[in-house]
Image (cartoon, rainbow, N blue to C red):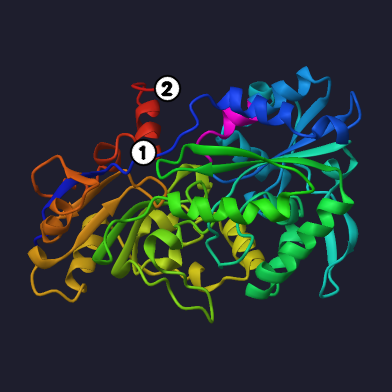
Amino acid sequence: MTLPLLARVRQSVPQPRVEDIPATVRKRILESGLAQRVPAGGSIAVGVGSRGITAILPIAQATIATLKQMGYRPFAVAAMGSHGGATSQGQRELLAGYGITPEALGVDVRTDMDTVVLGTNIVGLPIYFDKNAYEADGIVLLNRVKAHTDFVGVHESGILKMLTIGLGKREGATQVHKLGLRGMREVLPTVGKFLVENTKFALGLAIVENAEDMPAEIVALEPENILDLEPGLLAKARELMGRLPFDQIDVLVVGELGKNYSGAGMDPNVIGRLMIETMPDFPRPVVTRLVVLDVSDESHGNIVGVGFADLTTERLVSRIDHQAFRINVLTSCCLERARIPITMATDREVLEAAVQTSWKLTPSEVRMVVIPNTLELKTIWVSEALEAEVSGHPHLKRDTEYEPIDLGTDDTIDQAGMFPESVCGRRAATSTGHGH
């Protein structure tokens, strides 16, 4: 069957940006009250997580370097809950995928899963906390503040969540997620407050990203102000985050899902589907057919989020790491998103089935959008049915004619060719020796 013709479109919303990341990190740490909280020469656990924060390596390197210059003994610690199959080796591999290695940082990277119990939460469950971090003289956390993929609350993804769930390891993550939305909205902030007061938490560097996934702002959150300041940063992050510029889409094609793009595999704030039991979807965009073609290498076989899609490829499902997937899904208690959709052998079959079932009479009427993932939305491909909206939009520019989708001889979309600037494109360039 005929598929809609597509053209490349660029989104160019003006973006605030941190120009000198290392200098900004250094300034925030030196101007903070960290030196008053951590004894001279003390050890500092620097928490790093599993999200694909674009600038995490230079931020981590600048943090470690600054702490060393101040006379401290820093080490990195995995702060990612149950990710990586909830194993030390799995979390070490995830961090290495972001460049967070002992060689790159010049310090230990500790991924042990050992925890201590520090108290009980408001529903009587134990509060777990990473043993390495607890025994350090100070704790510094590096994390992005952004809209959460599961719920809307005062505190969503950020430093407080990393302290509570990330450093809670598998058990800590389970205790918060066990109660579903109540756990995230009520238990998380109260446990976070308890941990701020009952651990050596000394500083959080909150990264607010722009729509191009680069730091728009890096803010120091201190124990005395984190609960007051983080909600304002969340509101700012929500305003800046990349979104699709259309309210209604007949077929949305996502090249890759992955934990490096979103904790949910695909960001619900972008695709419009929340798929949390008892909760309604977001008002926009309304997507009739959502397809996902592959899982990122960086997700290490964790295909969480595949259940958002109506159709997927056998290629994606065959790459599943059952253990990592199962642990992450059961820990999150969000099972609907993990259901395997209808699978087909090739990208072509998936696209044809999506178009055929999109409730439009002819392919030329289908409002189709292709994106590399839900994090990188600067370049998108759209069908002719969206031309009027593209040409009338102040921040959209079409820079090719409408042409047939290139599916190659194996009926697979050339994602790297369509999105050379994306994670997928950079990965392909590196593997063929044309990039770094």
Q: How many marks?
A: 2
Please give left or right for residue 57 compared with residue 188 in the image. left
Q: Is residue 56 magenta?
A: yes
Q: Which residues are magenta?
A: 53-61
Q: Amino acid at mark 1?
A: Ser
**How far from the left and from the top, in percent, is residue 23?**
60, 22
Residue at image mark 1: 422
Establish if 107 lies above or below 340. above
Identified at 72% across, 50% down, the residue is 226
Query: Closest to the observer: 286 or 357?
Result: 286
Mark drawn on residue 436: 2
**How far from the left and from the top, in percent, is residue 286?**
31, 70
Q: Please, what secondary structure does the residue beneath circle 2 have?
A: loop
Q: Is residue 8 magenta?
A: no
**How far from the left and from the top, in percent, is residue 195?**
82, 54
| Res. 355 visible in picture | yes
Q: Please, what secondary structure does the residue beneath circle 1 have?
A: loop
Q: Amino acid at mark 2?
A: His
Q: Nearer the viewer, mark 1 or mark 2?
A: 1
Establish if 314 lies above or below 417. below
Q: Earlier in the sequence, mark 1 or mark 2?
A: 1
Query: Closest to the observer: 79 or 425?
Result: 79
Quadrant of the snapshot with the N terminus: bottom left
Q: CA distance from mark 1 to mark 2?
A: 13 Å
